[in-house]
Image (spheres, rainbow, N blue to C red):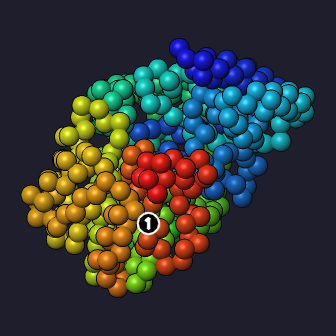
Amino acid sequence: MSIKQLGKAFLSRLLEAQVKQLRSKNTFKVVAVVGSVGKTTTKLAIASMLAPQVKLQHQAGNYNDRLTVPLVFFGQVEPGIYDAVAWLKILRANRRLLKKPYPYELVVLELGSDGPGQIQQFAYVQPDITVVTALTDEHMEYFKTLDAVAAEELTAVSFSKQTLINIDDSPKQYLNDQQFLSYGTQPADYQVVDRQVQATGEQTLKVKLKDASITLQTSLLGGQGAKSVLAAAAVAHLYGLTPEQITANAAQIIAVPGRMQLLRGINNSTIIDDSYNASPVAMKAALDTLYAMPAPQRIALLGNMNEMGKLSPDMHTDVGNYCDPSKLDQVITLGPDANAYLAPAAEVKGCQVAAFTSPYEAGEYIKAQLKSGAAVLVKGSQNGVFSEEAIKSLLANPTDEAKLVRQSVFWIKKKRIQFKR
């Protein structure tokens, strides 16, 4: 184990002990979100849904690992791992907070894992409700099989008082022996019965709660966005909000950077910014959203899906096969596996394809092809891809660059080195 790993483990144990103290001395509740995709959007949807009626604590980004989850309880910001002075200040500030009544009724968390055994580390959190967003391929470089993914994510069921599972994106064989409430678009305890999509991408959802039916308006895009809103409505219902409150609060839920965010592009185009990360299920869901948009031209920039391990060739080929030439004017690929496997598969399907290794070059290429009123999807994983950088050439308002993911000094420096800009 490296010095950095030892330091993280040591700090994590100290912070976890403080959270245990906090839980033992106060009576607030915890909602946790786990799953292969959609965790951050679902977490923020839940927080937005409950915030008007509940005094809650959450973190807007993705503090979801062993070191950062405890920080959420105390509202702390993660410093550099080697900044001993900053960590000491955090631990001291937390001790002071432990002497006072906790000011929040609820903490909403995202619990992440990129390898077997990590979810179990969060058992001390003692969630009152855990939402499982999906059991699909993720970090396959480490999990190897979907069986291992499901076993990992469902570990949370064992230490949660109540569990909500998205049955649309969780294979039935993994749920047979589990105790849970279901949500999804098929018959479930909480169900989207009907979904109407406006030209703007906004959706009207007819939702069945366990004891009521309501209609929700949301600006979140696509089927995945609808399920995030449904999860938030289900949690709110279990928490005790009325159908009227849930209906009113749904309008507070908005997209966040890099996760199906709509941006205004040049030539009156619309950009679907889903550049934060990518997996096969999420890639297909994003394409479905693009396919449904009424536009004279549809372009999909599909970047590498990282951390797919030995399954990467098949997974990229599968997404390439999902590209529909009747609904896409052009497919742009970005990154080694996307170029090697996704691009040729899309070409065989009949799509017009262009491949790039730089997001900046890909953005300039799209800019030259862009017709008035076009719709452009931008999606890809993080390292080696950074598809968000392709968006910069396409923005109608350059100040919207601030709305993109990974725009800190750290990330910009990393991108400049990688792409020699």
**Residue drawn where x is 54% and y is 39% of the image:** 33
Q: Residues within 10 Å of mark 1 (few under 14, many from 20)?
A: many
Counting labels gives 1
Q: Amino acid at mark 1?
A: Ile
**Residue drawn where x is 22% and y is 72% of the image:** 329
The one of 17 and 186 positioned closer to us in this rendering: 17
Displayed quadrant of residue 6 = top right
The one of 346 and 31 positioned closer to us in this rendering: 346
* Residue at the limit of the structure toward the top, as seen here: 1
| Residue position for label 1 | 391
Tag 1's secondary structure? Answer: helix
Q: Is residue 110 visible?
A: yes
Q: Is residue 319 visible?
A: no
Residue 163 in percent (x, y) is at: 51, 35
Left or right: 288 as drawn, with respect to 119: left
Residue 379 in percent (x, y) is at: 37, 56
Residue 407 in percent (x, y) is at: 57, 56
Residue 14 in percent (x, y) is at: 73, 20
Q: Is the residue 326 above or below the residue 34 in the image?
A: below
Left or right: 264 as drawn, with respect to 251: left
Displayed quadrant of residue 222 = bottom left
Q: Is the residue 180 above or below the residue 379 in the image?
A: above
Left or right: 172 as drawn, with respect to 228: left
**Residue drawn where x is 15% and y is 65% of the image:** 351
**Residue drawn where x is 59% and y is 27% of the image:** 66
The one of 277 and 187 positioned closer to us in this rendering: 277
Q: Is the residue 396 above or below the residue 352 in the image?
A: below
